[in-house]
Image: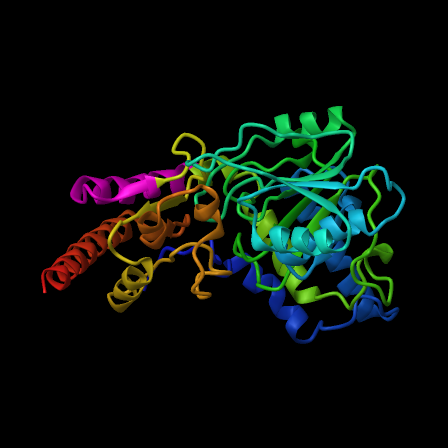
Amino acid sequence: MIYLDYNASAPLHEAAYEAMQPFLGERSANASSLHRLGREARDAVEQAREYVGALMGAGSPENVFFTSGGTESDVWALRGVFEQKSNTERNSLLVSTVEHPAVLDTAAYLSKHGVDVQYIEVDSTGCLYRLPVTKKTRLVSVMAANNETGNLYNLKSMALWAQREGALIHTDAVQALGKIPVNVNQWGVDFCSVSAHKIGGPQGVGALYVHPDTSIGPLITGGGQERGHRSGTLNVAGIVGFGAVAKAIAGKIDERSRRMAALRDRLESQILTALKTVHVLGDLEHRLPNTTLLTVPGIKGEAIVLEMDAVGVAISTGAACSSGSGEPSSVLTAMRLANPKIQGAIRFSVGVENTEEEMDQAANAFIQCVERLLTVAGQIENV
């Protein structure tokens, strides 16, 4: 199988696999326990916190809190800010219309509970040009990189806009981590969500960066783990795996980005040369190096995914979180694209482990698949 769905989940990195093994076996213990195994587990968690924090540019590792994944981190950032009643005059949340469902659904939840939610619209390429922050805005939430189009957003300038009005800013950097340089201090954000499995760590582990001068309430209460910010027994093996892969790829981000971009461009150019009806969606100048979102008007993306799967190539119609829901992509809908373009959307997301030969094979399989489906569609129309 040629795996080209890295934005959904990256295969487990060897460094993560090896680091996790002892904590799934003889060194398994509760990191809150006082005995030796508990202390060793706690030390391993803190070492992982340093590695993850360094990959995020977080400064002190104490600013990083482990969660169950990107979704929890997003929900915690938004609800943690607004469920504190310390600033009732600032009751507005500003989010873009192309955010991950974890952000959009939480915004809808907060709206039902009295928060004034304002949405930032994008253009037909998914670009965001203005940030209408006001004195009533308490939090702005804009992703670093879009999971479907791969679009990148200028967080540094957005953070400055937010700060001028005294607002906080959160970014979902789940898709950015490991693909482009992530540096929360340089960006100037107050909160940043990341996930382990997008960079080759285990599924079910994530983290939230919280600026040391920023206050946030807990989402999950209980035993007081994570210095009282996020209760629940720590997933030691998962956290250790997250730290191991963060350490393994640190210092290699630029190299990884160039490698992924070369593979993506090789695949994309072959497809666009052969199929004149296929177009790339999104901002071609500012996108993740591994992502291309194509559209084949007249053919449903699900049909292409299944055809490609049958010949041994794994791709996606878009976000894995919602691709099986049957609902049109909220991202492409927000871009106000015509329905045939939305229905025909296909996402390729490559990884550094892929090869040039795989790009050639996948491109050839895709071209044959689309030509076959277009022929069938034409025959049906003529019946």
* Magenta stretch: helix, strand or loop mostly: helix
Q: Position of residue 274 (x, y in %)?
A: 16, 43
State which quarter of the image contains the C terminus. bottom left
Q: Position of residue 375 (x, y in %)?
A: 12, 58
The residue at the point 81 percent across, 57 percent down is 226
Q: Position of residue 186 (x, y in %)?
A: 66, 29
**In this orientation, which residue lies closer to the viewer: 229 or 133?**
133
In the image, is residue 9 part of the stretch drawn in magenta?
no
In this rendering, the count of numbered labels is 0
The residue at the point 19 percent across, 52 percent down is 367
Color theme of the render: rainbow
Start-end of magenta stretch: 258-280
**In this orientation, which residue lies closer to the viewer: 277 or 190?**
277
Q: Position of residue 238 (x, y in %)?
A: 64, 63
Horizontal side of residue 65 vs 362, given as left or right: right
Horizontal side of residue 185 vs 154, given as left or right: right
In the image, is residue 274 part of the stretch drawn in magenta?
yes
The residue at the point 49 percent across, 58 percent down is 9
Q: Quadrant of residue 102?
A: bottom right
The residue at the point 61 percent across, 69 percent down is 21
Figure check: 147 above or below 12: above
